[in-house]
Structures are given as structure tokens and as C-alpha cells.
Amino acid sequence: MTTPRGIRNNNPLNIRKSKDKWKGLRAQQQDAAFCQFENMEWGWRAAFWLLTRTYYHTYRLFTIRTIIQKWAPPHENNTASYIANVSKMTGIGADEPIGIPSDQPARWMMLGAAMAIQENGANSIDYFAMLRGWELCRNDCR
């Protein structure tokens, strides 16, 4: 069985390369499309930064539907299925506000976990690394 790309890259949500210079990036980026992080905590930190600071605070996206429509657009993914799966896994309605990240951290962590499962499969997720990544995100800046 092949290890999913997001896990090999320590990038659980498969963040694409961009002009962003994330903390914890590997010195050598060998994947042509996706960021590669030194360890999974840094990959989770970047994922939670994007979800809570960029998507929530900057883009003002508050629901699973609006977040995933931007994260996993139809030209790259089966967006409707992605939304339905994440909504089912989290128990949060697709159009239900997730809440303010600082007030509802568990809901945002569930969102991240469900997205990582959608991207990589359920057997690949290190939930302790996810929690450490959340802490890095909440206690740090880019």
C-alpha cells in the first residue's frame, strides 16, 4: 500500500505551493505541486493557519460548504462529495456556521481532521501531531 502524498509530504491537507513561505518547510522541495514540511506538526500548523486565519478571518468563510468550495474547487475535485463527507464526519451541517476559532477550537480541529481524512484516508492521520499543529498555529505567527 502506498503512503498518501499528503502524508509523505507532512502536508495533511495538501497545501499547494505558492508565494507563502511557511514555517517548517523542508529546505528541499521535491514535490512539483504541493508543499513539503519538515514534520507533520508544521503541516498541520499551516493547514490551521489557512483555515482559521486566512479562510475565516480574511476571506470571511464560515461554513464547511464555503470553505471547501474554495479549498477543493470542482475543476480539481468532486466538491459536492467532499462537502458531504466532511459534513457527515464532523456532524456539522454544510451551511451551519462553524464558529469563531478561538471560541470553538474543537469544531475547527474536527474540520481539519475530516479534510485530512478526505485527502489521505482515515488510517493515515496522526491526531497528536494535529493537536501540536493547532497549538503552533494558535501561539505563533507566520
Image (cartoon, helix red, strand yellow):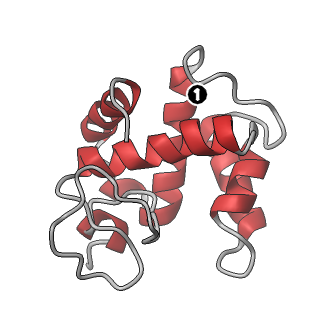
Q: In the depicted view, which residue is nearer to us: 139 or 19?
A: 19
Number of numbered callouts drawn: 1
Q: In x, y percent, where is residue 81?
A: 72, 64
Q: In x, y percent, where is residue 55?
A: 64, 45
Which amino acid type is marked by label 1? Arg
Q: Quadrant of the N terminus?
A: bottom left
Residue 133 occupies quadrant: top left
Q: Is residue 21 above or below residue 90?
A: below
Q: In x, y percent, where is residue 69?
A: 75, 60
Q: Residue at x 49, y 33 (%)?
A: 109
Whether residue 69 can be seen here: yes
Residue 88 occupies quadrant: top right
Q: Element at badge 1?
A: helix
Whether residue 88 can be seen here: no
Q: Is residue 74 above or below residue 133?
A: below
Q: Residue at x 32, y 38 (%)?
A: 127
Q: In x, y percent, where is residue 28?
A: 16, 75
Q: Residue at x 74, y 54 (%)?
A: 84
Q: Quadrant of the C terminus?
A: top left
For this view, does 105 lie left or right of residue 63?
left
Q: Residue furthest bottom?
A: 32
- The residue wearing badge 1 is 107
Q: Is residue 138 above or below residue 58?
A: above
Q: Residue at x 63, y 60 (%)?
A: 71
Q: Residue furthest right?
A: 95
For this view, does 135 lie left or right of residue 110?
left
Q: Residues within 10 Å of mark 1 (few under 14, many from 20)?
A: some
Q: In the depicted view, which residue is nearer to us: 27 or 121?
A: 27
For this view, does 105 lie left or right of residue 86?
left
Q: Is residue 39 above or below residue 95?
A: below
